[in-house]
Amino acid sequence: MKDFLKFTLATITGLIVTGVIVFFISILVFFSMVSSSESETQIRKNSIMMLDLNGALAERSQENPFEFLLDDEYSTYGLDDILSSIKKAKENEEIKGIYIQANSLATGFASLEEIRSALKDFKESGKFIVAYGDTYSQGLYYLSSVADKVLLNPQGMIEWRGLAAAPMFFKDLLAKIGVEMQVFKVGTYKSAVEPFVSTEMSPANRKQVNVYLASIWGQLTSDVAESRKVSVDSLNAIADRMIMFHPAEESVKCGLADTLIYKNDVRNYLKAMAGIDEDDRMPVLGLKDMVNVKKNAPKDKSGNVIAVYYAYGEIDGGTSSSTGEEGINSVKVIKDLRKLKEDENVKAVVLRVNSPGGSAYGSEQIWYAVSELKKEKPVIVSMGDYAASGGYYISCNADTIVAEPTTLTGSIGIFGMFPNAKGLTDKIGLNFDVVKTNQYADFGMLTRPMNDGEKGLMQMYVNQGYDLFLTRCSDGRGIGKEELDKIAQGRVWTGSTAKELGLVDELGGLDKAVEIAIAKSGVDAYTVMSYPKKESFLESLMNTNPGKYVKARMLNGKVGEMYRQFSILENFDKCDRIQARVPFELNIQ
């Protein structure tokens, strides 16, 4: 018995000691991870910056403690990190050029256009850009075409085929399970409801999609034609040939690529471009290295701040399908904008909007916060891939609106959707009864269709919401309501067309918006600061839902577009029933 107690006690003691040791080792590992992520990168002579693109693009980077749960083949990049890194590479004399390794990147064309513009600016330094791909996706070829040299695997391909939009429709699926969507909308082109009530695009929606696809494709072909010295007509002819299925040599002959080369030989190719002997070292700096490069800028002591506030994702409507992060929380945004309004050091605010819209109520709340902020200091909006419907609602009252030519904006209109699940409850044998004190006491019950009186009230409410939306945009843009209504009606426009219509003031990216904010602020000395503040590693560890993050990232990486469209249904119960939103999934490929 003594030996038993002795061995039991020894085992328990051993487990405790082991646990304590593991705990302290974990603490040491944790702090070493934090310290290593904050250590400054020292740039050595003859360095090359590498943009290894294989994953999804977000507006801002945010270190995620659960990144290690996924392999390194699929990453999330911050547009802010990419743009700042390109600028640092331009300014640093030790960096000889940029190497783009083009694999895949889930993002919109406006973001690609912004990166491409930054790369074009980089080339003005006299440094080179080289791009390599085994298989170039259409978006990444557009980005890579700005390079001095486009390299292609001898057995590779360049996807260049034109644009298509193929939305998914759920009507028949819902009918099979006994669910009908009751829809109320204003706007001939407000097509967000179509996936739930139709099996194909309406003529009006097909018309608007044709127009904005042609506008985006026109911008892409124009930019590629300029960079590659190939005419727009030739680029369209190449697209119609489906060059991706021809031997790789054809891509060189028609001017899309410069050289066929295997990836193993790219390093020596880069050394030759940089004027480095094959035997000499050529340090390669990845995006994470560049983020930790100190920016060569004198520290401003004036205390003046030009604030860049990021508002991206759906407005009060669930999470991002690519990163699992929350979208625009109207309560948080109005609180943050109030703080910027009250901060005397903040001299101007750039509101960076990348949103397809969402809750009409949340959009109105943010609109009011922007209006109050505008009373105290200049507000400039910079639009990303989307700033449509609710995204345009929160932008329309700014002093100046800046968008990329391929930004999707407008979509001034609202809708409401209420499911009727009577067919489903009948299928599974559920019955309901009701006792009520007033005519509409049971309004909104999902187990029966709406009656005519309820439908009339809902349509009246939606009409009022549309009229308010028109009023906000009319006042903000200085366009008469009747004139504005002709270009509203829920119609989506590209940034270039929106400028012609008066919905946008300037074409350009975030840098352009910051320049305008600085000019309007009237200050000579300033510091540009980003808001809201990024979470620390520890805050991110405490706040991130690992299950949601991993699921969203893995599903997005494996089934791409299909998952993003089905995620609409996943978040439907979290959305307000009155929405100011673009079509649920534009699905441009």
Image: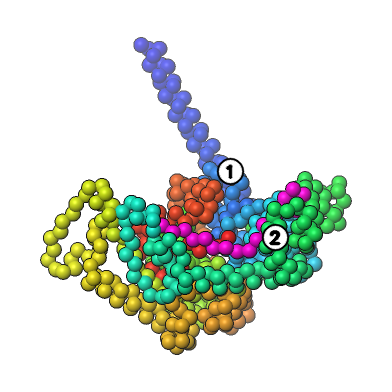
Spot occupied by residue 576 in the image (x, y as percentages of width and height): 35, 64
Q: Residue at x 23, y 67 (%)?
A: 451
* Disc 1: which residue: 71
Q: Residue at x 60, y 73 (%)?
A: 215
Spot occupied by residue 217 in the image (x, y as percentages of width and height): 63, 69
Give, as a three-letter code, the residue at label 2: Arg
Looking at this view, is 259 or 72 the one in front?
259
Looking at this view, is 307 or 417 the one in front?
417
Residue 488 visible within the image: yes
Q: How would you classify the magenta stretch by its main secondary structure?
A: loop
Let me know if residue 164 is in the magenta part: yes
Quadrant in which the C terminus appears: bottom right
SS assignment at label 1 = loop
Residue 223 visible within the image: no
Q: Residue at x 47, y 73 (%)?
A: 204
Spot occupied by residue 385 in the image (x, y as percentages of width and height): 55, 67
Give, as a three-letter code, the residue at label 1: Asp
Looking at this view, is 457 or 209 the one in front?
209
Q: Which mark is residue 169?
A: none
Q: Residue at x 41, y 16 (%)?
A: 6
Question: Which one is closest to the eye, mark 2 or mark 1?
Answer: 2
Looking at this view, is 44 or 197 the one in front?
197
Let me know if residue 34 is in the magenta part: no
Spot occupied by residue 166 in the image (x, y as percentages of width and height): 52, 60
In the image, residue 3 sits, relative to residue 451, either above or below, namely above
* Disc 2: which residue: 241
Residue range in magenta is 152-170
**Residue 530 shown left or right of residue 178 in the figure:** right
